[in-house]
Amino acid sequence: MSGHSHWATIKRKKSAGDAKRGQLFTKLAREIAMAAREGGGDMDTNFRLRIAVEKARSNNMPKDSIERAIKRGTGESKDGFVFEQVIYEGYAPKGVALMIDCVTENRNRTVAEIRHILTRSGGSMGEAGSVGWQFTRKAYFSIPSKGNDFDKIFELAVEAGADDVNQDQDTIEITAPVESFKVILDALRQAKIEPEEAELRMIANQDMELDVNDTLQVMKTIESLEELDDVQSVYSNLRITEEAMAALES
């Protein structure tokens, strides 16, 4: 998992500019609105909304923007758009499996944009169910290694229900069943440990490793998909090696 975490760090750095930051906030606002529409505006009772708001806060989204997104989802604020969530399945170049999580008010536009990027790069759209079986939805946490005690976090996370806790030079990662998300997040907060990432994500049951050039080609495709306004997240079964990560950073 560490390669994916490093890639997320790189993406955060790339999003530092005003334009990229605005696009990120748009995606986060849609995620919050969808969660509020489905489960109401109370974070204490709406698990999905709590996750979306935590993610927005971790990305320094303004409080008033978060509140507007919640009201938009609950119907207190109307703007004429009705969003829906849809997950598309497909393949990047070299047969890498993709799960593409979207929030959109126009499915036809979204699927056309995704198909264009995949086809242009040598990938393809997949039928429903053709890729999903290769992934499991998990709770995921990423914590900086610097300044944190791995043994303490390991013990805390396992006691709270984590499946796995691992560490590399920069990051401590926790994966857990979805139902353990709140327990683990609360335990981290009580211990005054603030995760860089805390979310639900689709994690591949088995990773696929490619050489550096092929990895860069696939990551370019994934990045193009992630730049679409309607795309919230792209999950893949690609394993990013240290060599490929060094090439990405350069």
Image (cartoon, rainbow, N blue to C red):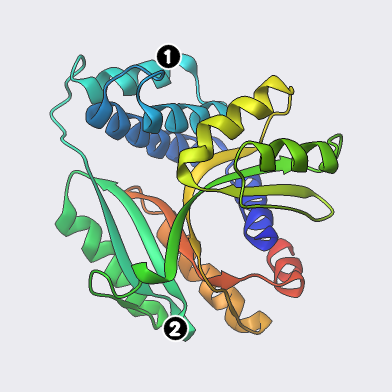
Question: Does residue 1 appear left or right of residue 206 in this picture?
Answer: right
Looking at the image, which residue is at 51% across and 25% down?
A: 61
Q: Which residue is mark 2?
A: 95
Considering every residue shown, the one lying at the far front of the view is 159
Question: Does residue 61 appear left or right of residue 230 in this picture?
Answer: right
Q: Nearer the viewer, residue 128 or 166?
A: 166
Indicate the amino acid at tag 1. Answer: Asp
Residue 50 vertical placement versus 160 (above, below): above
Q: Nearer the viewer, residue 207 or 215?
A: 207
Please tell me whether mark 2 sits on a helix, a strand or a loop. helix
Q: Which mark is residue 108?
A: none
Residue 4 vertical placement versus 232 (above, below): below
- Where residue 152 appears, x then y in whole percent? 81, 36
- Where residue 129 appears, x then y in whole percent? 27, 70
Residue 187 vertical placement versus 134 (above, below): above
Question: Does residue 56 appear left or right of residue 144 in this picture?
Answer: left
Q: Are marks 2 and 1 in contact (CB under 8 Å)?
A: no
Ranked by sequence position, the earlier of labels 2 and 1 is: 1
Q: Which residue is mark 1?
A: 64
Image quarter of the C terminus:
bottom right
The label nearer to you, 2 versus 1, is 2
Indicate the amino acid at tag 2. Answer: Gly
Q: Quadrant of residue 33?
A: top left
Looking at the image, which residue is at 43% across and 32% down?
A: 52
- Where residue 86 appears, x then y in whole percent? 25, 52
Image quarter of the N terminus:
bottom right
